[in-house]
Amino acid sequence: MALHRAGQGSPELVEGPQQNGSVESFNGRLRDECLNETLFVSLGHARSVLRLWRDDYNHVRPHSGIGGLTPADAAGRVVQHRPDGHHDNPGLQL
């Protein structure tokens, strides 16, 4: 459960998948593409399969929510900004 402030009114309680759509989307992909497809025979095997899936997810496949970049590419575009035009505070440049 989370509190969500709608407009100027009082906070509303929000439950379920709408609480954090990004996390729910990631969890669904992980479950559908990896966990449901693999019969793990050991903890080491599970770690190895998940490491490969995570590498593919972060370094190979583009994500529409970050302009078609991979998360690794998007992280490489993080720059520092300051009001005077110099760069100090983290921000994402797409």
Image: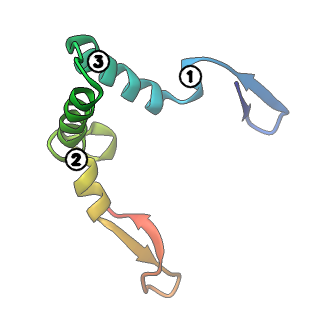
Q: Type of residue at label 2?
A: Thr
- Does the CB distance between marks 1 and 2 fall below 8 Å? no
Question: Which label's residue is closer to the chain start, 2 or 3?
Answer: 3
Residue 9 is situated, as x and y percent measured from the top left of the image, at 83, 34
Residue drawn at 24 percent across, 18 percent down: 40
Q: CA distance from mark 1 to mark 2?
A: 24 Å
In the rendered view, tell whether residue 2 sits above or below residue 56: above
| Disc with the residue nearer the chain's start (1 vs 2) | 1
- Within 10 Å of disc 2 (Cα), the crowding (few <14, some 14-19, many 20+) is many
Q: Residues within 10 Å of mark 3 (few under 14, many from 20)?
A: some
Q: Position of residue 83 (x, y in %)?
A: 53, 82
The quarter of the rendered structure image containing the C terminus is bottom left
Q: Give the spatial CA distance, label 2 vs label 3.
A: 22 Å
How far apart are the two marked residues, 1 and 3, measured between alpha carbons?
23 Å
Labels 1, 3: front one: 3
Q: Quadrant of residue 52?
A: top left
Could you tell me the amino acid type at mark 3?
Answer: Leu
Quadrant placement of the N terminus:
top right
Q: Residue at x 30, y 27 (%)?
A: 43
Name the residue nearer the viewer: 26 or 54: 54
Per the image, label 2 sits on a secondary structure element best described as loop
Q: Quadrant of residue 24?
A: top left
Residue with the mark numbered 3: 35
Is 55 left, or right, of 78 in this rendering?
Answer: left
Q: Of helix, strand and loop, which one carries label 1?
A: helix
